Image (cartoon, rainbow, N blue to C red):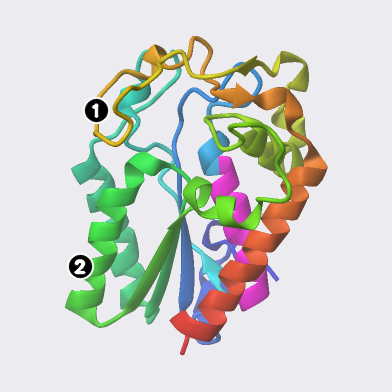
Amino acid sequence: MENRIKYMTWTEFDKRRKETKTVIIPSGAIEVYGPHLPLGSDIIVAEKVAQLVAEKVNAIVGPSVEIGESAALYAFPGTLVTEPENLKAVYRDICKSFIKWGFDKIFILNTHLGNTVPLNQLLQELQDTYGVKCASIGWWQYIPHLSQDIFTTPAPHGHASEAGTSVLLYLCPEHVDISQAPCNYSLYQDPYPHITKFLSFDKFTSNGTIGDATAGSAEKGKQVVERAVTEIAEFIKNVLEK
C-alpha cells in the first residue's frame, strides 16, 4: 500500500484519511556531507525512515521541504539555506492542511539540527491552537542511545562520520562513494565546549566530515535504522495515538 501522499491519487488519499489520523512529515537539508555522501543526505534519510515507520503504523507520509536552516555550513558549495521563519511558515501550512483533512496526530521526522527549534515551536503552537497531538525527533541526536554497541570509533556521530555513512550505505548505497570517505577529526579544539558559539563549519573541517567515515558499513546502518524504526513506531502506537 502506498503511504506517501505525493504518489497517491486524490481518491486514494480520501480513502486513506478515513483509515488513519496520523501523518509523518520529513524534514532535512541540502548541505555539505563530506566528499563521499550526497548533499541531500539529511532529507534522503528523513524521507526513507518516515516511509519505514509509516509502514509499521499505517500512517501517511507528508511532503517535505528539502532545504533547511544550514547557514553555518554556507562555506561549502552546494549548501542551500532557508530562514527559520520561512521553514516554520511552510511547515505550518502543510500541517494545517492535514488538520483540515482530519489528521490530528502529527509527527515530524527531522534530520537536521538547524530545523529543530522552529519546528518544535510550530508543533507546540499547533497542539495549543488546534488540540492535535504532536511529537518529533532530531534523527542524528536520537540514534546514539540505540547504537552504543554498534559504532566503534571515537566520534561516530560527528558530521558525515561513521553513523551517517552507515545509515546512508544502508538506505541508499547507490549514492555513496565509500572510496572517497575520509577520516579526520575536528580542526577546532574548543576550550569552552559548554558555551554556545557561532562559528562557520569550515573552522571544524576542511571537507565536511568530522570523524572516521571509513568505519561506516551498511550492516551497522541496518541495525540502527531497524532499532529506531521499531522504537518510533512503538511510540506512535502507544503514546501519540492513545
Q: Residue extending furthest bottom?
A: 242
What number is the disc on residue 197? Answer: 1
Q: Residue at x 73, y 47 (%)?
A: 150
Q: Residue extending furthest right?
A: 219
CA gap, disc 1 to disc 2?
Answer: 28 Å
Indicate whether 61 appears above or below 99.
Answer: above
Coordinates of residue 168 in the picture (x, y in percent): 68, 38
Coordinates of residue 39 in the picture (x, y in percent): 53, 26
Magenta stretch: residue 53 in it? Answer: yes
**What residue is shown with label 2?**
125
Front-most of residues 36 and 30: 36
Indicate whether 213 appears above or below 117.
Answer: above
Whether residue 54 appears in this view of the structure is no
Provide the secondary structure element on which disc 2 rests: helix
Identify the mark nearer the N-term, 1 or 2: 2
Q: Which residues are magenta?
A: 44-58
Coordinates of residue 94 in the picture (x, y in percent): 34, 60
Q: Is residue 166 left or right of residue 240?
A: right
Please count the marks in the image. 2
Provide the secondary structure element on which disc 1 rests: loop
Q: Amino acid at mark 1?
A: Lys
